[in-house]
Image: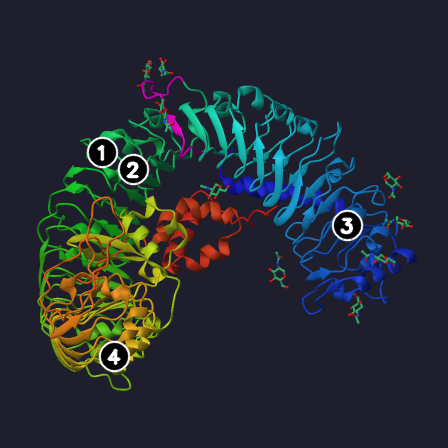
Amino acid sequence: MTSSPIILCLLFEFFYSTLFNHVVVSSGGQCLSDQQSLLLQFKNTLIFNPTESKSLVRWNQSSDCCAWEGISCEQGRVTGLKLSNESISGGINDNSTLFNLQYLQSLDLSYNFISSTIPSSIVFGNFSNLTSLQLFECDLYGTFPKEMFQVPTLRILDISRNGLLEGSLPEFPPHSDLQIVNIRHTNFKGTLPSSVGNLQQLTHLDLSYCLISGPLPKSIAKFTQLVHLDLSNNQFSDPISSAHLEGLLNLLYIDLHNNSFNGYIPSSLFTLPLLEEIDLSYNQFSGQGPTSLGHLALSYNNISINVSGNGSNIPFLPKLNILLLRSCNLGKFPEIIKNQAELTDLDLSNNQIYGEIPNWIWKIRNCSLQYLNLSHNQLVGIQEPYSLYNIYNLYSLDLSFNQIHGKIPILPPQLYYIDLSSNSFTSSIPSDIGKSLENTLCFSLSMNGLTGSIPESICDATELQVLDLSDNNLYGKIPTPAMSRSIIGVNLRMKNLSGPIPDLFRVDCSLKTLDLNGNLLTKSIPKSLANCTALEDLDLGNNQMLDTFPLSLKNISGLRVLSLRSNKFYGQITCTESVGDWPMIQIVDIASNNFSGELPGKCLTKWHTMMTVTGYRQSQLDHTILDSSRSPLSNSRFLWNISYEDAVSITHKGLEMQMRKIASNGFTYIDFSSNKFHGEIPKELGQLISLHGLNLSNNVLSGQIPSSFGNMRQLESLDLSRNHLSGKIPASLSSLIFLGFLNLSHNQLHGRIPGSQIQLFPADRFQGNQGLYGLLVTLNCPGDAAAPDISQETPKANHSISGNNEIEWNLISAEIGFIVGFGTVIGPLVFWKRWRKWYFDRVEDIAFSILPQILLRKWLSWKMGTRRGVRAGGRRES
Ligand SMILES: *[C@@H]1O[C@H](CO)[C@@H](O)[C@H](O)[C@H]1NC(C)=O
Ligand SMILES: *[C@@H]1O[C@H](CO)[C@@H](O)[C@H](O)[C@H]1NC(C)=O
Ligand SMILES: *[C@@H]1O[C@H](CO)[C@@H](O)[C@H](O)[C@H]1NC(C)=O
Ligand SMILES: *[C@@H]1O[C@H](CO)[C@@H](O)[C@H](O)[C@H]1NC(C)=O
Ligand SMILES: *[C@@H]1O[C@H](CO)[C@@H](O)[C@H](O)[C@H]1NC(C)=O
Ligand SMILES: *[C@@H]1O[C@H](CO)[C@@H](O)[C@H](O)[C@H]1NC(C)=O
Ligand SMILES: *[C@@H]1O[C@H](CO)[C@@H](O)[C@H](O)[C@H]1NC(C)=O
Ligand SMILES: *[C@@H]1O[C@H](CO)[C@@H](O)[C@H](O)[C@H]1NC(C)=O
Ligand SMILES: *[C@@H]1O[C@H](CO)[C@@H](O)[C@H](O)[C@H]1NC(C)=O
Ligand SMILES: *[C@@H]1O[C@H](CO)[C@@H](O)[C@H](O)[C@H]1NC(C)=O
């Protein structure tokens, strides 16, 4: 029997619907008149939207009620009522004529907005033959009546996805007929009573996403019919023993993830005859790992596989498909894998596996491996001799964040996702690499010690969407993959690339991110870059480019980051009606160039993002800065935030840090420093009320500081030093309560420094002016946080006292750049495995809409072409 989960789902679907059909759809007889009038009365009391209703709206006197949609009858009596997704929003209460339909066996009101408590009449009494009650996703609240579980005739009870519905599990009477119990995503609390063992007909038990705690009763061993057991995302605790498992002879699927189970995993779990899919991750299991199974997820436990054995003594070897042992504290490769002939997905990431990658891993029998993730370990090499060509099914290879040295392995051409970043590969990139990347969508070699040039053949990688070669010692010219049709992210941030940027961006360019920061690039910004209308982040900083401001990019309305920092750009920035219209822009860094003329005041008011206050706060930024890991697999946030993500690196007192997700942080910053701008500071700047950092220092600006600056309430950093500014410091600046860095030194300002907050900045931030006074000197007394205030009543210049106890949040010398979040642009590739799970969870629509079409096609063809063959209807979220 195949272990494909799709088959499992189909089976379940089939089972569920046959049972359901059996109960409900059989119809018979001509409607008895009392039944018809009861139904019409019931309809009249219901509140529903007739334009969205499909069945209910058509019930009327003119036809026999047993022929109405949603009704089934036996001998003219209504036995089944199915009104799911009829946009019913009320009208069901204890008085409802519904409860006079005493022959009812099956009631389905799922997918409505009933928004009420469960009528007490439903438990009784009148529905003496009720076998099926389906109320999933009904917005029910209140307490679910325990007695419902005890109705002797009931076989199906599904009240899942009513997040506000409270309840607890009752004592279950003997001889219960319950076959399907689903309370997923409700607010059920308490323990699972031992009497649950009385549910001996149970085939499907789903208690997931509730708040159920305590041990799992051993009586579950009596579930001899059970096929599907999902207890995930609860608070179950204690160990599981083989006594729990004895009778589970029909179990196909068990999901216990995200609980607090502990102790050893009983080996009998892995010898259950039909078990195909198991998820024990996110628990506190410890000890020896298991040995065989269809799909096995043990991630986030403290499991060590017994590596002294070779697996030959273990029964049921050939069934393992998916083995996830991420973050399991493994120190060695589990050799047991050697004999896993059907292994397709292997995740050993985030362990402490050291040494070489054994060459047997490429030879796992039947060449079945498709997904291999060994990232975040302590691997140093790849055992010779080896050939990756044997594993012709492999589509995703992640060896990132190890210390693998030597040559880049020869990669088989079918790989879609290749991450070799953050290792110690030192060779040059093979000149024929393009051949290996024929099908590759995502390729990273960043953070290695690679030398040599970027081979032209990389342009043969026509499918490539993300290319990240950053942080290597490559030199020479930029090849042209950036101009390939499909590419959306290029990161060549390193030191020694030279020559001009090729002017070959095609009319259908789909580039979103281009990072060429920190090289020796010359000449101008290619005019054809204007073809890349999807461009969001452009970082050309720290090169030797000679050009004027890129007016050619004026139509790229999605631009978020523009960095031209430290080049030889020159000329005026003229903002006419049609220029610089970048409503999304968040970071403009053109510092350290030769720009001249007046500041482009008119542009500023077109930069809407900077004029809209967002949720960004400094504390958020601090967190993100700390999060310097950038492997997509190490961060589950990536799993959802797929479309695009990037990182901005900021030089923070000389330290380069990465800030993730500027977009979602809403971080905004303008740096025009170290140019030759003259004239007054445009008062329009004050309209950028959500700006977080502003640097205009080291220009020839004159006139006064606009008092409109007081409107920039989000401002955390302001540098106007080394200009010719005159007049007084506007009092409005004292309302900038987030201001953590201020530098007004070396201007011609005079008068009293306003506001106690500003007066507390260190004296050197005001020095070199004509005459500023009013500074509050803060003395740094050990053990005494409260500093005494000494008012400086005399005008001061070149003040020498410098307070040093300020908490500095120094963004002023920020070098803005960004790193293509490799794997973030195309995060979906990471998901093949997860994607399958989504698929089953009926989130396929979401996944479809976020997956790049090309990837989708690949996936489908892969899926169709290989084992799966069937497109499942998807599991009923039941
Ligand atoms: C009454 O029911 C019949 C049969 O279902 C349907 O064709 C007809 O449209 C209904 N009439 C009204 C007014 O809803
Ligand atoms: C409910 O009906 C609407 C159309 O009225 C449809 O779009 C939606 O998919 C249905 N939902 C379910 C869960 O069947
Ligand atoms: C039930 O009916 C009685 C009498 O018709 C009425 O007073 C009462 O409010 C009704 N209860 C509900 C819950 O509608
Ligand atoms: C139960 O059914 C009987 C007979 O149809 C009816 O008289 C009675 O009101 C029903 N009880 C409830 C609670 O609706
Ligand atoms: C319940 O089912 C039994 C057996 O099928 C039948 O004899 C009885 O009439 C049913 N009662 C009602 C109220 O439908
Ligand atoms: C585990 O469950 C908690 C809530 O009980 C939830 O916050 C957390 O995200 C879950 N973790 C995983 C990995 O599913
Ligand atoms: C993992 O298990 C080992 C022994 O197998 C133990 O020494 C270690 O403390 C455990 N780690 C955690 C985090 O529980
Ligand atoms: C590991 O397996 C070997 C051989 O199968 C066995 O001799 C040894 O006892 C096992 N070690 C542990 C800790 O179970
Ligand atoms: C596995 O180990 C057993 C003894 O522990 C040995 O007899 C057998 O040859 C080994 N098999 C392989 C494939 O190494
Ligand atoms: C855009 O691409 C077309 C065709 O590739 C090219 O002819 C044109 O010059 C490009 N546009 C610009 C503005 O360079």
The residue identified by callout 2 is: 374
Query: Is ligand 7 within 8 Å of the beta carbon of the residue shown at mark 2?
Result: no
Q: Is 258 on the left-hand or right-hand side of 152? A: left
- Using the image as rendered, state which of residue 203 and residue 111 is in the foreground: 111
Residue 133: x and y in percent read: 73, 45
Task: Work out whether 65 lies above or below 443.
Answer: below
Q: Do residues under tags 1 and 2 come within 8 Å of each other at their CB atoms?
A: yes
- Was residue 172 drawn as part of the magenta stretch in this picture? no
Name the residue located 34 percent from the left edge and 63 percent from the top edge.
666
Q: Nearer the viewer, mark 3 or mark 4?
A: 4
Picture disc at residue 119: 3
| Ligand 7 shown in quarter | top left
Identify residue type, mark 2: Leu
Q: Earlier in the sequence, mark 2 or mark 4?
A: 2
| Camera-nearest label, 2 or 3 | 3
Residue 379 is tagged as 1
Query: At 17% from the left edge and 54% from the top edge, which residue is drawn?
Result: 804
Label 2 sits on a secondary structure element that is: loop
Residue 620 appears at what percent x and percent y? Answer: 34, 55
